[in-house]
Image (spheres, rainbow, N blue to C red):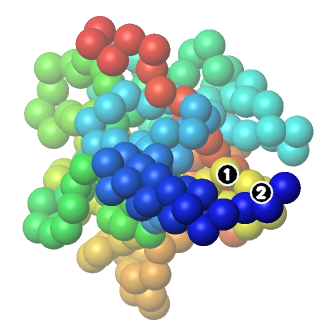
Amino acid sequence: MKITKFAVLSFLLFAFTATSIFPHAVHAQDPEAVIDVNGNEVTPDARYFIGAASDDNTTTLAVSATSRIICNSDVIISSMSNGLPVTFSSPVGESGDRTVIREDSYLNVNFVAATCRMAGVSTMWKTELRPTMRGFVVTTGGVNGLNRFKITKYEGGNNLYQLSYCPISDPMCECSCACVPLGNVVDRLAPSTVPFPVVFEPVADQSS
């Protein structure tokens, strides 16, 4: 069937109109945005479970805490049913668009949980030297602007990510202040040379 010039011009006009009226249909996502398990951009202050992805992309483990009421609680790897949701936000002083969480940008991470009534207690993540673990672990009690984390692509897996801790001025900075990957160290989230892949699952009820 012979295609007329009119038909070609009509198609091009329709395509141009569609991209003008519906730009999100063509550019649905920020190319640097972190994507959740539903294919949506991860956004600041929304609640997510951090799932530990296995080789077959199933998530049976999740990030949680040693106590569901945060009181200097460590960040642990637990069953998915015991996962504790978190929120992501930009540290104080960080500039730029804050409508989505982007790969390789500095972040604060907070558990969505109640806290005990003790001085210095907060739900914000930080790292702390733990002699019993022979090194640093990720724990709670962080301060905004001093405890930075990053989300980056995990090598060897599609739509998988890894978490890193980015020190500013603590003993981990004696040689280098480069970000340190986090992994599962005896069921604790801790700096590790073997990072583990994670995914982000939005909490079904964001209002609770």
Left or right: 201 with respect to 149?
right
**Can I make out residue 192 in this image?**
no
- Residue at position x 27%, y 76% in the image: 169
Point out which mark residue 78 bears. Answer: none
Image-based side of 31 in relation to 133, left or right: left
Q: Residue at x 63, y 45 (%)?
A: 198
Rendered location of residue 168, percent (x, y): 29, 74
Q: Mark 2 highlights which residue?
A: 157
Q: Amino acid at mark 1?
A: Leu
Is 30 left or right of 45, judged from the image as shown? Answer: right
Q: Residue at x 22, y 55 (%)?
A: 98
The image shows residue 137, relative to residue 72, as above or below, that is below
The answer to whether residue 12 is left or right of residue 61 is left
**Pointers 2 and 1 in contact (CB under 8 A)?**
yes
Residue 171, quarter of the rendered image? bottom left
Question: x, y percentage for residue 59?
Answer: 73, 30
Estimate how packed mark 1 is, as few (under 14), some (14 to 19) or many (20 or more) residues with alpha carbons within 10 Å. Answer: many
Q: Residue furthest right?
A: 56
- Kind of residue at badge 2: Gly
**Percent from the top left, x then y, of residue 10?**
51, 57
Secondary structure, mark 2, is loop
Residue marked by disc 1: 160
* Label 2 – label 1 distance at C-alpha: 6 Å
**Mark 2 neighbour class, 10 Å CA radius: few under 14, some 14 to 19, many 20 or more:** few
